[in-house]
Image (cartoon, helix red, strand yellow):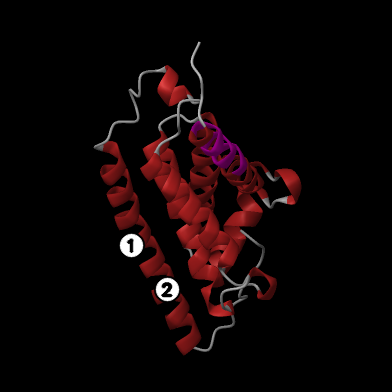
Amino acid sequence: MTCYDRSDLGLLLLRLGTGGVLAAHGAQKLFGWFGGGGIEGTGAAMEAMGYSPGRQSAVMAGLSEAGGGALLALGLATPAAGAAAAGAMVGATAVHAPNGFFAAGGGYEYAASLALTAAGLAVTGPGRISLDHALGHAVNRGWMVPAALAVTGAATAVVVGLRNRRVREASASGESRQETLFDE
């Protein structure tokens, strides 16, 4: 019998907590569960926040959060799961950044914390109490960490950059924009 150490238990708790929160947020976007808007409502919200096309943005954000969160909780494909979830949360951070740091004022504190935790899990790995460990780390190789973070980072930079340009253009043309339609 294998004896697990404190770091294995700590990583399990981080994965379950962070993955569960992310999966629930993704389910709000994809299915309308837990008071969420579903694809249609989230798509409209994404469009209003500058993410266009809204429906596709809602699907991608929902899949990144729900899929990445579920995989993190299970400890499966941890580099890709953590990177995907972190990318989605960086997108949420961009929306909340104009409101400052603290979440109480609509700021990016919460989204950034989830992003950093997901990225940290991608780098650290899932620990021994995980499906990755049980499967011999077939989808959790060392080279996968920088690859997943680089691909996700590049895609996120493009998506957030386009969103920020749309917001600036809308602001310059005098269009009104709802700052935050719902918490990520």
Does residue 75 sit above or below 21 in this rendering? above
Q: Which residues are magenta?
A: 8-17
Residue drawn at x 44%, y 81% as measured from the top left: 168
Percent x, y for residue 49? 55, 69
Percent x, y for residue 117? 49, 51
Residue 25 on the magenta segment:
no
Q: What secondary structure do most residues of the magenta stretch adopt?
A: helix
Percent x, y for residue 85? 47, 47
Does residue 37 sit above or below 17 in this rendering? below
Residue drawn at x 48%, y 31% as measured from the top left: 75
Which residue extends farthest top? 1
Which residue extends farthest left? 143
Instruction: Please identify the quadrant where the C terminus is shown.
Output: bottom right
In depth, the one of 21 and 26 nearer the eye is: 21
The quarter of the picture where residue 134 lies is: top left
Residue drawn at x 67%, y 76% as measured from the top left: 105
Q: Which residue is mark 2?
A: 164
Q: Secondary structure at mark 2?
A: helix
Q: Which residue is mark 1?
A: 158
Crowding near the residue tagged with mark 1, few <14, some 14–19, many ≥20 C-alpha atoms within 10 Å: few
Percent x, y for residue 88? 48, 53
Under mark 1, the amino acid is Val
